[in-house]
Amino acid sequence: MKKIVLSKNAPAPIGPYSQAIQLGDFLFCSGQIALDPVSNQVVSGGVKEQTEQVMKNIEAVLKAADMNFSNVVKTTIFLTSMNDFGTVNEIYGGYFPQNPPARSTVAVAGLPKGVSVEIEVLAHR
C-alpha cells in the first residue's frame, strides 16, 4: 500500500503531487527545487545556493521517511545549463562521500519558478 510522505521542513508541493510516496521499502521522491520551506520563495543567489537548498530539501523528505542519503539508490539531476554541471556536481558529491547512487543528468529548456537545478531521488530501506 502506498503512503504519502510529507515534511514540514521541505517546501509544500506547488502542484498536484506529493513530496514523496513510500511503497514497501522504496521511497519515490518528487523533484526538489530551491524553495525555502518557510517562505516558499526561491532562495537568493546562483546555482551554488540553489543546489545547497535542493539538497537540504531532499534531506528533509528523506528524514520524514526515516531515511537518509545512504538510502538513495538513483538520482536524476535537471539543469537549465550544462555550464553549471561542475558546481552542482561538487555540492551534490558532498552528500554521497561513499557508494554514490546511480545518476542521470539532463539539460532542460526550463524548470519551475525559473530555477537552475532540480533533483529527484529514489531511495530504498
Image: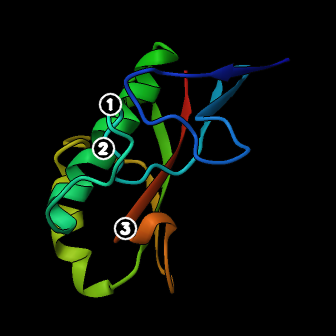
Residue at 52%, 34% in the rendered image: 12
Q: Is residue 110 above or below residue 98?
A: below
**Farthest right residue in view:** 1
Q: Earlier in the sequence, mark 3 or mark 1?
A: 1
Disc 1 secondary structure class: loop
Q: Is residue 114 above or below residue 51?
A: below
Disc 2 secondary structure class: helix
Query: Mark 3 or mark 1, which is nearer to you?
Result: 1
What amino acid does circle 1 point to?
Val
User: Observer-nearest residue: 44 or 71?
Assistant: 44
Separation (CA) of disc 1 from disc 2? 16 Å
- For disc 1, the marked residue is 38
Query: Mark 1 or mark 2, which is nearer to you?
Result: 1
Residue 40 image point, x, y percent: 39, 42
Residue at 19%, 42% in the rendered image: 97
- For disc 2, the marked residue is 55
Q: Quadrant of the C terminus?
A: top right
Separation (CA) of disc 3 from disc 1? 17 Å
User: In this image, 20 relative to 94: left or right?
Assistant: right
Residue at 32%, 31% in the rendered image: 38
Residue at 24%, 52% in the rendered image: 43
Question: Residue 115 got which mark?
Answer: 3
